Amino acid sequence: MRPLLPGEPLRVGRYEIESALGSGGMGTVYLGRSPGGRPAAIKVISPDYLEHREAVARFRREVTMVGTVRSAYTAALIDCKLDAPPYWMATEYIPGPTLSAAVRTEGPMPPSTCAEVMAAVAEGLSDIHRHGICHRDLKPQNVILSATGPQLIDFGLARSAGASGFTLTGVSMGTPGYIAPEMVDGDDLTPAADVFALGVTMAHAATGRRPYGEGSFQSIYVRLVQEQIDLDGVDPALAAVIRACTAANPAARPTPDEIIQLCRRLRSADGDTPTRMLTNLSPATPAGQPRFAGSARPPAFADAASMNGGPSRYAGSARPVSTPPGPLPSRPGPRDSRHTRPARPLMILGLAAAAVLVLACGGASVLQLFR
């Protein structure tokens, strides 16, 4: 999120623009508010592309895709304007950091957290695939870790499986390192391409590294085809699921529903319940700016060293650190000092009185008193 620059719109349609959430591809996404105060993500096509019929067609297709999908893992379409420039659409605003920002700030995620996020994103893919749509640009920057679960955003490159794509100069077909190899060699789009991107995305979440390294598109593609994905240091069971997702042969990759089952077994084998780390995110956190506010409990995916200013996150730990329990409740016993101490002066007075009675009345009279 950044302040508005000179020349950027202060109003789009009925929405007052507060700030920019991000830019890329063919436009900019702004944080806007409706007249009633409801926040929305407003995507506006860049003026540079208004003269490109292909760009306008692609934007209209994106609006159609977003309007078609109904899923708990995608932002719903609220409003749009496609009949005349400026072309824009408004979707639900989802507060929370992107997966990319969370890893950059907090470090690699532990296996149990990776399994939870991977299962949720796989369910989101399953939802959009049932609508006949492939995302085509799944990557850490396009997954928001909201308080209610991961959300898939940016359907700018999405299209129906088997449909032909638009060729547009200056617009990337995807992000190097996250594009399935069959999409570089040809244009045979299937849901398996999204599964490949999911595997690479979770490899980044587990390692904090670009799974196929840095460099030009050509160099990354060569490593993607000729080398194994970088999974050094990743839990073996999680690494096996990621390798299955990034298999060179699309037919060998698991389906999203199969990934969900694999992740459930992963969590069961680990012996942990889901970390539910997403519930620790502040609902007001803007996308791309991770912040864990309003709670004395640290995020479930932070270790003790990191919360105390240590140099690393999750160092040497395969599991998230549990929050220490609070102090045990006091259990006063029959001899609890809080109850016996106040009684001591009375006991002394009682014994003194008994001694006086013994001296005054004799032992027999005292025995009569206690019968």
Image: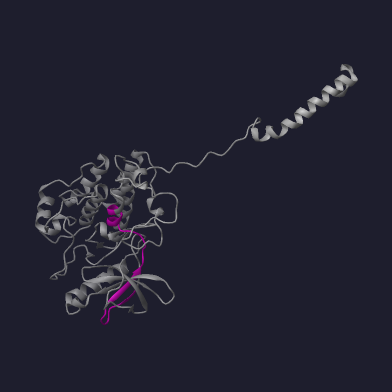
In the rendered image, residue 309 lying in the magenta stretch gets the answer: no
Quick one: 67 or 348, which is closer to the camera?
Answer: 348
Instruction: Please tell me whether residue 317 is drawn above or below residue 192 in the rendered image.
Output: above
Q: Is residue 82 left or right of residue 168?
A: right
112 above or below 281?
Answer: above
Tell me how the rendering is colored: one colour
Residue 55, how many percent across, how many down? 19, 74
Q: Nearer the viewer, residue 369 or 215?
A: 369
Q: How many marks?
A: 0
- The residue at 9%/57% (across/down) is 218
Q: Which residues are the magenta region?
A: 79-104
* Residue at the extreme top of the image, as rendered: 363
Magenta run includes residue 88 = yes
In the rendered image, residue 22, in percent from the top left (x then y), is placed at 27, 67
Image position of 184 (left or right of 99): left
As displayed, is residue 269 above or below residue 369?
A: below
Q: Where is residue 200 drawn, in percent x and y?
A: 22, 52
Residue closest to the eye, 49 or 284: 284
Vertical side of 190 occupied by 276: above or below: above
Q: Which image quadrant: the N terminus? A: bottom left
Q: Position of residue 165 (x, y in %)?
A: 17, 67
In terms of image quadrants, where is residue 355? top right
Out of 104 and 232, give the one closest to the viewer. Answer: 104
Name which quarter of the figure residue 121 lies in: bottom left
In which quadrant is the C terminus drawn?
top right
Point 12% across, 54% down: residue: 220
